Structures are given as structure tokens and as C-alpha cells.
Amino acid sequence: MIITGDDPEYIAFVKARLRDQFLMTDLGPLCYFLAIEVSSTSDGFSISQEKYIQDLLARAALVDEHTVETPMELHVKLRPTDGDPLPDPTRYRHLVGSLVYLAVTRPDISYPVYILSQFVSAPTTVHYGHLLCVLRYLRGTITRRLFFPRSSSLQLQCYSDATWANDPTDRRSLSAYCVFLGGSLVAWKTKKQVAVSRSSVEAELRAMASVTAEVT
């Protein structure tokens, strides 16, 4: 359980009442919770999953030490029929599932993780190769984290984008958006649109509608 607030006396009161009713241990200031690392300074606090990435790379058992600059090449369009089916898709599914949770603190992998998660039912060698690319990217950017400044304003800023007819199988577009509260990134998402857009303008409007609904 995480207890937050701006009144230390009331937080102490809540913890005392909880101790009266339940057997509990006070672990002090938040620093690690559900594989998410939290560090605080006078300027603000940051969250990351560095240890989680280390464990993920160990489970992936990469045999080389290579790193890459981007998690996925530009304009890549993967199909279900690309490559040969994996004899045992268990590792692919396990690694993609771990990446989905990692995207909680790493918005920079949101797009490739969404793409790769579409093939968990029948992954191929090509899909697995792109998965390894994401892991090599994480190896080179393992210390990246989200920072939330204390002096941030409360002004909302939203950005959206769309890739028109990006999916070569069903021609549906992808929407993506991110929402900032002042200088803090507080929400982001990548998702395939529910219908086929007949123009790039229509795809962009659907993306704008998604971020508007999120902000509302």
C-alpha cells in the first residue's frame, strides 16, 4: 500500500489507525514498489525500472552485448506471415508480456511493444528478431527514467499523431498520444484505430478524438 499526501501529521494518523486494525510494517519513504523504482530529490522525483530491465535481459539470454539507437526501424510493417513460425512461442510471449509492463515507465517503447504484442498467438522468426531489437535498445538506455519536477505548472499539454493505413493486413491506422501536466508526462498510449480511415486527415482526427477523451 502506498500512502501519499501533503500533510505529514495526517499521514501518520492514517498509518496509526491502520496498525490498530491490521498487522502491517511501515517501510518508510517510497523507493521500490511492484518493480518500479522511485527516487526523490529537492527538484522532484523520478520513476524507473532499471532492475526490472536487468532481470528481463537475463531471462532473454542474449548472447551478445550489442545495443541499438532505436527500438524499431522506421516504416517497418510487420505481417503475420513474415518469417517462419517459432517452434516454441513461449519465450516470445513471456518477453512481450514483460515489455508491456515495462512500458508503464518507458513510453519510448510503447509503439514497438504494441506492434509486437499483435503476434503473440503465432510469432515468427522475424517478429522475434524485432523483439530482440527492442531488448538491445533497452540495454543501451537502461538508466532512462521519467522525471516529475516539483515546480511544474498545472497546465495540460496534449500531443497526438497517427500513421495512416499502417497495418498491411487490415489497413487500419495507429493512433498515439501523450499528455503532459506542466513538465510531467502523465499519460500516453498507442492503439490501432477501430475503423479504416479513408484519408490521413481522418486518421489524425481519430487520434485527436482519443486524446480529447483521455483529457476529458
Image (cartoon, helix red, strand yellow):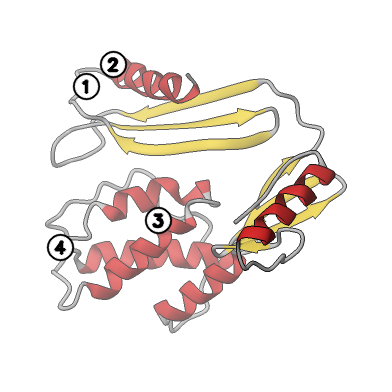
Cα distance between the residues tagged 4 and 1: 27 Å
Whether tag 2 and tag 1 are in contact, CB under 8 A, the answer is yes
Q: Earlier in the sequence, mark 1 or mark 3?
A: 3
Graded by Cα atoms within 10 Å as few (under 14), some (14 to 19) or many (20 or more), the crowding at tag 1 reads some
Residue on which the image places disc 2: 202
The disc, 2 or 1, on the residue closer to the chain's N-terminal end is 1
Question: What separation in Å lies between label 2 and label 1 (alpha carbons)?
Answer: 6 Å
Q: Is residue 110 visible?
A: yes
The residue carrying mark 4 is: 122
Q: Label 1 belongs to which residue?
A: 197
The answer to whether marks 1 and 3 mark residues whose Cβ atoms lie closer than 8 Å is no
Q: Amino acid at mark 1?
A: Ser
* Percent position of residue 216, x then y: 47, 19
The answer to the question of whether label 3 and label 2 lie on touching residues, with beta carbons closer than 8 A, is no
How far apart are the alpha carbons under marks 4 and 3?
18 Å
Q: Amino acid at mark 4?
A: Ala
| Front position among marks 2 and 4 | 4
> Is 90 placed left or right of 163 in the picture?
left
Q: Is disc 3 placed on a helix, strand or loop?
A: helix
